[in-house]
Image: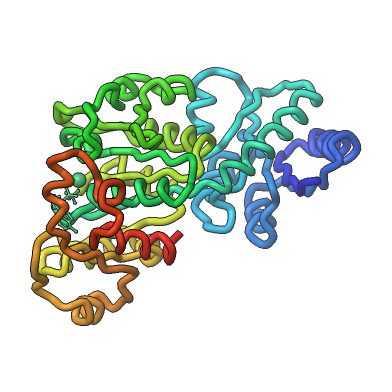
Amino acid sequence: MARILVVDDDTALLDMARVLLERQGGHEAVLSADGEEALAIAREDPPDLAIIDVMMPGMTGYEVCRQLRASPETASMPILVLTARGQPVDRAAALEVGADEHVAKPFKMSDLLERVNDLLERGATAARTRIVVLLGLRGGVGVTTLAVNLAATLLREGRDSVCLVDLCPSSGHVALQLGLRPEPNWKKLASIATPDADAVAGVLMEHRSGLRVLASPIVPVVGEGLPRSTVETVLGTLRERFEIVVVDTPSVLDGATMAALEAATNTWLVMAAEPASIQTVLGTGRALGEQADTFSVIVNQAAPGQAVSPRATEQVLKRRLAGNTPFDPGQAQALARGQPLAFGEPDSPLAKAMNGLVKTLI
Ligand SMILES: Nc1ncnc2c1ncn2[C@@H]1O[C@H](COP(=O)(O)OP(=O)(O)O)[C@@H](O)[C@H]1O
Ligand SMILES: [Mg+2]
């Protein structure tokens, strides 16, 4: 039995939904005819799923969705929206605000119950999935290296479904570190407005370890990389299929990066212990506000020697470091061979540090 919030200004529909969900579905229905009130109910005691009508006077259903997705306690709650029409643009609008499903009005009550039960089942998988996003706006601080080694460590630890996503439009570096030629890559998805699960599955590569990879193209993209809405759709699809999704982001807060940060269950902010990187981390905090407070800051030593000690770094940043990954002289060889240290040399300093980080952070 699930607790389901139904939001619609049409009280006749609310009554029918209650009968359907409670008598036929064996669920508990919580009803609201007003968006503001529904938000308050959802925040106070998050339901297992919400059914939200789009067309409502006052706060629209889209706005309710957006706000639910923005609150941590309801960010991953399954949402089904009821749209007035069933056009592709209605579906796109629903996905854009973070809904998982949409049903066009009018609909058969039995169909609605089927979709609700489906979504509850899928939502349970999606809710278990972790999306770990690695970000470092300084560039060259080791975001890609840590993303690749994190994914490799998770796989070695026995997580059986791990997907590594390279959102950087600058020449397929994730694939390079894995010794793969990035074909296919996400370039094909960029031209599709809302790629479905088959389209996404069609561009995933499989590394011999079993790791799935969504690579970026080897020829750098001129202009922006993947559009924000495409990244939202792609991560939504991967969330349903994998236990863990690791995302390497470009060193800019573009649409793709912002979509990844919104979908993230964990964000690792990677930096170097040197002034430019410290300034960048402080600036990232100012750009993203409270969202940045939840990030785990990791100092990676991409080059030998550290200009600023970890303690001094913490003092300047006024926050604790979540981890410290050492300079590993084997990394240059690992990159040249296309074999991440976490796969090829599990006893190397970087692979060991990664083991520790995974235990504390995931
Ligand atoms: N811990 C480390 N030890 C040694 N070399 C590293 C380490 N982390 C990163 N590097 C190297 O530093 C360079 C930049 O790393 P990369 O992951 O591409 O950074 P970013 O993705 O942030 O631009 C690469 O040559 C990489 O092999
Ligand atoms: Mg990189």
Is 111 on the left-hand or right-hand side of 234?
right
Rendering coords of residue 252 (x, y %): 21, 47
Q: Is residue 97 visible?
A: no
* Visual colour scheme: rainbow
- Determine the residue positioned at 17% across, 46% down: 334
- Determine the residue positioned at 60% across, 19% down: 86
Relative to 325, say whether 318 is above or below: below
- Determine the residue positioned at 10% across, 69% down: 275
Rendering coords of residue 204 (x, y %): 37, 27
- Determine the residue positioned at 60% across, 41% down: 125
Quarter residue 203 falls in: top left
Rendering coords of residue 153 (x, y %): 37, 51
Residue 344 or residue 269, whichever sits in front? 344
How many marks can you see?
0
Is 345 on the left-hand or right-hand side of 121?
left
Residue 44 or residue 100, whichever sits in front? 100
Residue 21 or residue 337, whichever sits in front? 337
Relative to 2, say whether 25 is above or below: above
Relative to 84, say whether 148 is above or below: below
Relative to 340, say whether 55 is above or below: above
Q: Is residue 284 visible?
A: yes
Rendering coords of residue 95 (x, y %): 50, 33
Q: Residue furthest right?
A: 23
Is 171 on the left-hand or right-hand side of 314?
left
